[in-house]
Image (spheres, coloured by chain):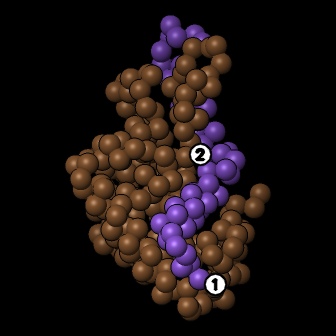
Chain colours: A brown, B purple
Amino acid sequence: MSGGMTSEEPSFKREMLAALPSLRAFAMSLIGRHDRADDLVQDTIMKAWAKQDHFEMGTNMKAWLFTILRNELYSQMRKRGREVQDSDGYFTESLAQHPAQYGSLDLQDFKRALEMLPPDQREAIILVGASGFSYEEAAEICGCALGTIKSRVNRARQRLQEILQITGENEYGPDATSAPMTSRAFVS
Amino acid sequence: MSVRTDNPNAQIATKLRALYLSVQEEAIPDRFLDLLEKLDAVERQSMPDVAE
């Protein structure tokens, strides 16, 4: 994605804006909750802004931002201990919070399945399967070897298949306890 | 409703993208637009010769 720029000089801010929708989607796919995802995006914007001298205009802004976001997420997770990593309840309530967003039950099932992946597998399959990065770019973003990314993506696929076959048979519908919280945050 | 087809990977890929796109297609929340405006404004103030 480039070239959509007007004839004005490319600005850091403008490029950042262009990458934001995808950055939010990445954060949301990793974390599973809009509020936390957007907090992380905000932290990422601040960090990136402070480091803008390190960014070379014309290089891949999106990959640069994704790298910052990812590092920020993991450093926050380390600070908070295991709490964040624990899938128990962490993603779950967002299904009920934003039912409209994930449309079909099918997608909600998928979201739950994604949540059950180990974080390294989850980010790998998101980067390659949804964000549009190559394996090479994903490896760079995650700071690991190409082969590692490939094997994480493969394991993620296998695991998702297993999970979806299992959960397809029972009911992970929207959850009555948190349903009343629906649509407060993002309706306006 | 079953996810078993002859190509489960394609199913997974489609759903993953659908989930991702559902967020990507949202409008950028005002909080981020405001934040960038502020950062930009602060920067201009601190750099006298960068007029525009």
SS at badge 2: helix
A172 up-or-down from A48: above or below: below
Residue depth check, mark 1 versus mark 2: number of the one nearer the observer: 1
Q: Is residue A13 above or below residue A119?
A: above
Q: Chain letter for mark 1, please.
A: B
Q: Position of residue A113 (x, y in %)?
A: 48, 75
Q: Quadrant of the N terminus of chain A?
A: top right
The residue at which mark 1 appears reads as B1
Against A35, is A3 above or below? Answer: above
Label 1 with label 2: CB-CB less than 8 Å:
no
Q: Nearer the viewer, residue A86 or A163?
A: A163
Q: Are labels 1 and 2 on one chain?
A: no
Residue type marked 2: Pro
Secondary structure beneath label 1: loop
* Dot 1 crowding, Cα within 10 Å, few <14, some 14–19, many 20+: few
The answer to which of A50 and A66 lies nearer the viewer is A66
Residue that label 2 marks: A21
Question: In this view, which residue lies farthest toward the front?
Answer: B6
Name the residue type under label 1: Met
Q: Residue at x 52, y 64 (%)?
A: B10
Of all residues, the one furthest to the top in this rendering is: B49
Is A99 placed above or below B14 here? Answer: below
The x, y position of residue A96, in whole percent, is: 64, 77
- The residue that appears at 67% across and 50% down in the rendered structure is B25
**Residue B45, x across and y down, in percent:** 53, 19
Q: Tell me if residue A90 can be seen.
A: no
B26 left or right of A13?
right
